[in-house]
Amino acid sequence: EVQLVESGGGWVQPGGSLRLSCVASGFTFSSNWMSWIRQAPGKGLEWVANIKQSGSEKYYVDSVKGRFTISRDNAKNSLYLQMNSLRAEDTAVYYCARGKSGYDMWGQGTMVTVSS
Amino acid sequence: DVVMTQSPLSLPVTPGQPASISCRSSQSLVHSDGNTYLSWFQQRPGQSPRRLFYRVSTRDSGVPDRFSGSGSGTDFTLKVSRVEAEDVGLYYCMQGTHWPPTFGQGTKVEIK
């Protein structure tokens, strides 16, 4: 079955860190750009970061630059998002998605709550 | 960043009737390669988003043909010829022509 499964979300205090993971199956992970997209409670969708097939190119939305790091392990069919210095405004469901800007496949999402 | 503006933001519809959502971009979405990278996504209640169309009008696999995508330049439209109960949810347009990718605010489709 073709799917993306995220994990690693949870509750964290402001200034804390979390590492999200996304495991892909059913397609050739190493051949695809991958992205993280988030959705704050009751809000719309926001692209967060993406990474090229080899990991040689990475891009971030301005609001997370210097705090978040996207990475991948093609041998493990896995995508990661290391989130540091978390802020209340980072509270959202985080989705991993296949593609650079087309997103033809999405995971079920993992909730990140930043609150004291 | 390119601003994507959807209208209406709320769309009550009667089953069996048509529905239309507009999406306007603050800049032309025609890429230098000649393609227009405009996609539509559906998000049913409690579910992840699902892509319906890419490059304006190319329908994704499994999308009913009562849905259609059209438009060019800065003006785009998602149409449903006959709304069904399963079409309830949020609909988003998204541009991938300019960096960074940006989404519209979303249009909530609900049954009257």
Image (tube, coloured by chain):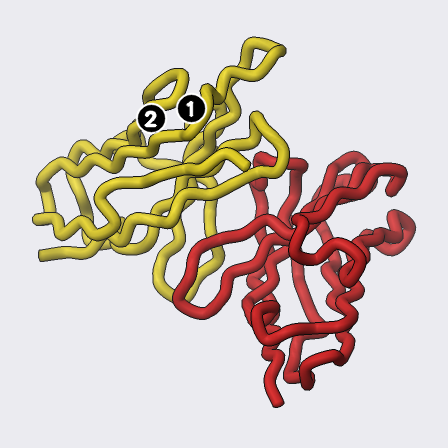
**What residue is at 75 percent from the left and 64 percent from the top?**
A21
Q: Position of residue B21 (x, y in %)?
A: 25, 37
Q: Which chain is yellow?
A: B
User: Under tag 2, what secondary structure?
Assistant: strand
Quadrant occupied by the C terminus of chain A: bottom right
* Circle 1 SS class: loop
Residue B34's spot in the image, x, y percent? 56, 9
Say left or right for A75 vs A88: right
Question: In the image, what residue occupies the spot 79% across and 54% down?
Answer: A70
In the displayed structure, does residue A29 sit left or right of residue B102? right
Q: Nearer the viewer, residue B63 or B44?
A: B44
Residue A7, percent across and down? 69, 70
Mark 2 belongs to chain: B
Residue in the picture at 57% in, 69% down: A89
Q: Which residue is mark 1?
A: B56
Task: Name the one closer to the observer, B4 or A78.
Answer: B4
Total numbered circles: 2
Q: Quadrant of residue A104?
A: top right
The subunit carrying tag 1 is B
User: Could you tell whether B32 is left or right of B22 in the image?
Assistant: right
Q: Is residue B87 above or below residue A94?
A: above
Going by the numbered disc 1, the residue's amino acid type is Val
Q: Specify whether residue B62 is in view.
A: no
Q: Residue B35, which numbered label?
A: none
Q: Residues within 10 Å of mark 1 (few under 14, many from 20)?
A: many
Q: Which chain shows up in red?
A: A
Circles 1 and 2, Cβ within 8 Å, touching? The answer is yes
Q: Which amino acid type is marked by label 2?
A: Phe
Where residue B42 appears, as percent x and y from the top left, is: 39, 47
Q: Which residue is mark 2?
A: B76
